Every structure is written in C-alpha cells, then in structure tokens.
Image (tube, coloured by chain):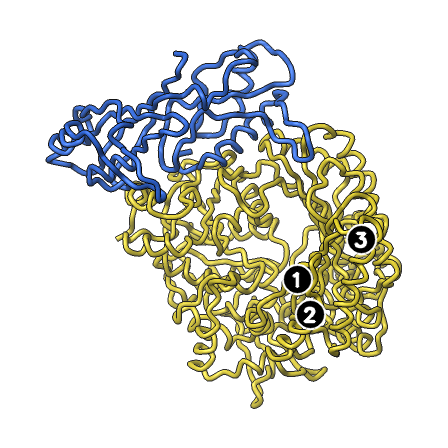
Amino acid sequence: MQYVGHLDLHHSWERTFRRSGLPLAYSQGFHPQPRLNLACALPLGFTSQCEILDAWLEQDLPIEQIHEMIANALPPGMEVHSLEIIDLQAPALQAQVTSAVYVITFLDEIPDLDDRIQRIIDIDHLPRIRRNKSYDLRSLIEGITILPQNNGGNCGIRVQLAAREAATGRPEELLDELGIKFEATHVHREKLILASS
Amino acid sequence: MVLTPIDIKSKLARILPTVQKPARYIGGELNQVVKNWDSIETRVALVFPDIYDIGMSNLGLAILYELINDRPDALAERVYVPWNDMETAMRSAGIPSFSLESKQPLTAFNIVGFSLPYETLYTNALNVLDLAGIPLMNVERHEMDPLIIAGGHATFNPEPMHLFVDAFVIGEGEQVIQEIIDVYQVWKRSSLSRHQLLISLSAIRGVYIPSLYRTHYNQDGTVNRIENLVDQASFPVLKRIVPHLPPPPTHIIVPNIETVHNRVPIEIMRGCTRGCRFCHAGMVSRPVRERSVSEIIQAIDTALKHTGFEEIGLLSLSSSDYTHISELIQAITDKYCGKHLGISLPSLRIASFSVDLMDLLKESRHGGFTLAPEAATEHMRNIINKPLSTEQLLDTAHQIYSRGWTTIKLYFMIGHPAETMEDVKAIADLCKAVLSQGHKAIGHRAKLNVGVSTFIPKPHTPFQWVSCDSVEQIQSKQALLKQELHHRDIKLTWSNPKVTLLEAWLSRGDRRIAKVVYQAWKNGARFDAWQDQFNFDAWMAAFDATRLDPSFYTHRSRSLDEVFPWDHISTGVRKKYLRDDFLLSQEFQIRIDCRVNCFACGILPAFAGLRRENPGDSWSCPEVKSPPRVAMTGVS
C-alpha cells in the first residue's frame, strides 16, 4: 500500500467493506458515495502504522463481529489494530488531528547529520515556498530527534510535525531543507495525535 | 549478469519514488498469486504490452492467469510495459523487464506469453523483450532463452510478428496453453534442441510456428504461395476453440490504483451471428457459445465476494443477442438491488428492447447510452451488413432521451467501401436528427457525443480485399463532419488518420512488414496506440529503410483470387464465403442474422466433431446431422 494515494486508499477501504459483507452506509443522491472518512491523507510513498478511518454502518453490530469481518476482508498490506464504536455526534476526524509523528530512515549514510539537524533546531524561521505560497516550516516542526543506528546500519530521525487542516508540516519539505533526497529515504508515519487524546 | 529479485527490489526502492504512479510496478494486490518459485517446474510470464492501467483490464490474460496458476506444476506472473519515465529509470539503473509478483527478471521464466489483441502493441512487445535482454529475433534465441509465444485477435494474421515470436496461438487459448506447458515440460526433461521443441509444439492444434513455413512472393510483391517446411507443420493452421466456455475467472486481481476497466468482467457469450462485414471479431470468434444464466449469476456472486468490486461488466460482441438476456438482467437486478452495484452492458443493438434492458438497470444508470449505427444511410448499412432503418434508430433515440438519459453516444465509421461525401454528410444529418429527438423529449438538456473512427479492412473479413482511404480523403471527410457538427450540444471525436494508416499496414501486413516493425522500434516507435506518443515519422523512416511501399498494403484493391499472407491461417470461415459476402456487398445485398438462416460460412464443418460432442443450444449453429466419420479398416 506504500504507493497507493489517498483516493485510491479510500477506494480500497470501500472494497474491503464490500468484501466483508458489512452493511456500509452510502450517501443519498444520484451518485451515492460510501460513508468512509480517513483522518489524514498519507502521501504517496509513505508507510504507516496509525491510520484512522471513520466508517458508517447501516446497522448496529457487536464490535468483535465487525473486527472479524473486516480482518477477513483486508487486502495485503493493511491490518486493523483496533476498532471502537464512536458517537455519531463526534467531530470529524480531520478536525481532531493536530500533529503527526514520522520516522524517517536514510538509505545512505549521512556523516554530518547531527550538524544538519542542529541547524534546524537552532534556527527561528525556515521560510519556504510550496505551490506558490510562502510559509514557515520551522513553526510546524514540533520535535525532532536522531535515532540510533538500527541493525541494518541505517540511521534515521523521528520528527513530530503539525498536521492541522491549514498548517501541515511535510516530511519531504523537511528532507529538502536537510539536503536529503526523498528517494534516498523511507518515511513511516508512526502516530497521529488527536486534539481529544 | 542476471539480477535476482532481491537486486531488483533494492534498485526499485530508489527509483519508484521518482516515477509517476509507482503502484504500477509493485504488484502485491489482492488475489495475485505468488507461488514458491523454486518448487514450480514451469514458470510462465504473461505480458500485456501496454502499461498496467490498460493491461490489468485485459480479460484474456486474467483467464490464462487463473488457469495456469490452478496447475500445481506451473505458475503465471504478470508483466506490463513501463511508462516512459520508468523505462528511462530502469535502463539507467540496469533493471530488466520483471514480473510484478516475484520481481523475477523475464529471462528467469520458461515461457513468455504476449497478448496481442491489436496491432499497435507490436513495438511495445519488442521493447519488453529488449528491456529483458532477450534476443528480439526468434532465430537468435538459444536453448536457455524463454520460449516466446503470443496470441490474441491480432495474431490471426501473425506474419508481421513472425520474426520475433517462436509460437503463435491461433484462436482461443484456454486449452492450448495447457498443452503448450505439457509439451514444454516433456522437452525440458529431454536433451532435445530448441528446434525440436518447436516441431513438437507444431503438433498442437491451433499452434503456428512461423519458422516452419516460408512465403514465396510474385514479382508484383503479392504472395505466390506459402509452404510448410516440415511435414509436422499443419497446413492450414486451423484456429482452436473451446466447445463450452469454461467457468469465468472469479479471483480477479483487485488493482490498488485506477485502471481503465476497474470491475468484474463476465463474458456472457463468445462469437456473434450478425455478420457485419467490417467486423474482425465477428468473423474470427465464431461460432457463438453462450453461458447459462445460473453460471453467470454464480460467477458474479463469487467474484464480488472475492474482489469487492462495485461494478460488473457483462461482456460479449452483441449483448442483446444473448438468448437469455432479459432473464439474466432480471435476475441480477433482483439479487443486487440496493447494493450499489454498477452494471455495465455494452454492445447493445439499436432497438427499443435494448432500452427496456437498460431501464431495468436503473441503479447503475450513470453516463450516457451508446449506440453504434456505424453508417448513416440504409444503403451504406446494407453494404456493411448492419441493416437498420433510420426510423428505428430515431425511435430508439427518442425512447432513450424520454426515459431519463440526457446523453447518447453514437459510433460511426468513415471510409467504408464505396463511400461518397454524401454518405459522410449523412452522418452529420443523422446526428442532428437524433439530437432533435432529444430536444423534443427533454429540451436542451439533451446532449449527443459522436465518435467517428475510420474503417480499416481486416484480414479474414469480407472486406479483406478492399483499399483504404488515403490520409487526405480521411482528413477531408473529418473536416466536413467538424464543420457540420459544430453545435453546442454535440461533442465530436475522431481518430488520427495516421494511426489508422499504421493499423491498416500492420493488420494486412505480410512477412516483410516484420522488418518495418523492427526498424520502427529501432527508430523509437513505442506506445503507438497513444495519440500523444505515436511517432508517424519513425514508421515512414522504417518503410524507407526497408524499401517497402506503405501504399502497397493500404491503397490497393486486391484481386479476388489474390493469395493473402494469412491464407495459411484458418478461422474456420471459408475464403469463398468471405468472397461471396464481399460480392454481395457490392450489390448492396445483406445477409441476415445467421441464427435465422445458416449461410454455411464453414465453421460447422470445421468443428463438426466438437459440435457433435456438444449438442444443445449453447451454440447458435445447427446441430450436425451427418454421422461421425469412422475409421474404416479391412475395407479397400
């Protein structure tokens, strides 16, 4: 699923529910759409262990049964960690997400990584332009630490970036600021932080 | 150095983030089959020579994938063509053509099977071989190289690809592929030469080994005769068919990205009895064989459970001719009502009955309603043998607009034999008449899409003798239509006349055209089916380099007794039948639906044994009355 974009992932979830036999709810109207809602788009090329999906069913069912039916219908590359019944009045998932934590592994050795990271930490502003809009990347970086080398010898960083609707920090922008090519890394989303949690 | 799957995967990790739609190249979808590579005796790569998005929607390969993987001693994996950005990245990283399932290089497979449903894939097929490091020319391959086979509708004239393919499958592949694997396994365990393998394969009915034949030409460039070089090579090579359609594939691979037909394909019927004279598929896929309603419903049910697709496509050449179509649509509607399932029912005849059918599929009524009159006057429709009154078309159009569709799509062809500018003008007039039916029914909400393609004479059809329009003729006909159909509510699309020309060269090409294909590929021709990739100059330069005249293949009326380069390939339909039908077209005479009146096309005698063993009405051909031929012994 690493190279599956947001809309296609949404489609995969629809098909998963259809295979499961669960009574997925659809919107009304001429082109009914499945009532599924992903918390935060995962950019193409990233992996993740923390995606959150809201799904509406037509009928109340025991949570264990839902879990089992979904688990049996998942495509390769997806698994369900936990499920809960939520209040229909709960705010939209997108509005609840505030930050995301990424683990970025480097495929090549970066001898002066410490210096590069320290420069980011020390600086007050990192003005950047994305899609013709200027913004300050530094204000979106909420935390950054260097990870010890793992067994394979690759080193990496863990970074917490803002993920609010109008203020989203992007790992690829940070990598560019660090002078590291995106294709020489592996980016994994480790955690989504919600306002309520 | 041959790369291992591990090498390929680690190289891919670096280049995938840099290319468009990397999911095209990773496999791993639901329902893909990955077997233990080392424990499987025969490994088959199934190649669709276009990108993933197109190839994943090909039903032929989906059928073969399931059939081969059902064998415990064989595996099948998929290979598609990398898009330009990926090809560049692969070549610079030294990545060969590889399979999606195991990331094995193509050279690691025993058999590489190409699907060639249309001619504009030929240069891509060469590119896949080149990217794999497999010699392009069959004569240059060694014992260790994979066996290169190809099938699909384009291979009913295999000659333009005869230099590159070791063995062609003529006709339906379901049984032949198993026999090819069996023969391959016996050969592999022996110490016999590659040539011996080809000889053994030639004994399989429906297999054509081009290196076992030679074509002799006349002074004027036409074919004098075709000769088989060994006795084992049958002459002619009669296509293979299956007497009963085997169960449709139901474990369809579910792509993780959008593809052209992202749905469950269910073939409800194969073959067609209408006999449209331009139609290659209608001639080469005879006889009609139908699946039962219960088998289709069962297959849909199983496929939906395994895939979760939200659309099914009920496929055939003429869906409203499927004997139990009403019963089928009713059953599907009853079963899946309220399940948000889209049902696509293409290839409907122009009749109110078709509107009734589509009306039943209310839930899936998105988009327009497509009709293919192909020609605009009753006179021209008689020439092409698609009889239909204009009144019936207008009446059907009125019903479609009245019953809730706002858009109709009409398909026409220009360049039919003996077509005049008046006939072309009639297309515009008819379109306006159809739209005015819409205006009458629903006012200015009514829209009309008009698709105008250009007729290409195809081998094995009654029009295989006729000459094509020149590019200038096509352009002036298209200009007339553009001018006449300049209307707020009409959207006109047409095909590139130069692509048409390419298809025309290749579809009736002889063995010499293979050198043109090779040269065009060397000149950079790729993705010839893609408007924005098609490189006409590469093809013209290829004709120059090979000193062949392109107009010999396109702008020449063939004499009635000409030997064609594909005459040693038999579809079961007799050449005499095609010739008679061609002559009837010149007298504006039609031949009606052959379910009503058998015109003895030749299919029945060609497959009399199969028909006798498979009685009943799943075939639309009459029962065979003559007793089976018994080998006579002791009588002289």
Left/right of residue A114 with respect to residue A61 in the rendered view: left
Left/right of residue A94 with respect to residue B399 in the rendered view: left
Residue B441 visible, this orientation: yes
Nearer to the camera, A73 or B101: A73
Residue B299 visible, this orientation: no
Residue under numbered circle 1: B492
Q: Is residue B564 above or below residue B19?
A: below
Q: Residue furthest bottom?
A: B219
Q: Which image quarter is the C terminus of chain A in? A: top left
Q: Quadrant of residue A116?
A: top left
**Label 3 crowd (10 A; few <14 / some 14-19 / many >=20):** many
Are circles 1 and 2 on residues that touch, CB within 8 Å?
yes
Numbered circle sitting on residue B416: none
Mark 1 → mark 2, Cα distance in angstroms? 8 Å
Q: Which chain is yellow?
A: B
Residue under numbered circle 2: B481
Which chain contains the residue that carries disc 1?
A: B
Q: Position of residue B364 (x, y in %)?
A: 71, 38
Numbered circle sitting on residue B438: 3
Q: Position of residue B523 (x, y in %)?
A: 39, 71
Are circles 1 and 3 on residues that touch, CB within 8 Å?
no
Identify the amino acid type marked 3. Answer: Gly
> Residue at position x 65%, y 41% from top?
B248
> Residue at position x 78%, y 67% from top?
B429
Identify the amino acid type marked 2. Answer: Leu
Q: Position of residue B176 (x, y in %)?
A: 59, 53
Q: Is residue B349 above or below residue B477?
A: above
Mark 1: secondary structure: strand
Q: Quadrant of residue A145?
A: top left
Q: Position of residue B551 (x, y in %)?
A: 57, 82
**Label 1 crowd (10 A; few <14 / some 14-19 / many >=20):** some
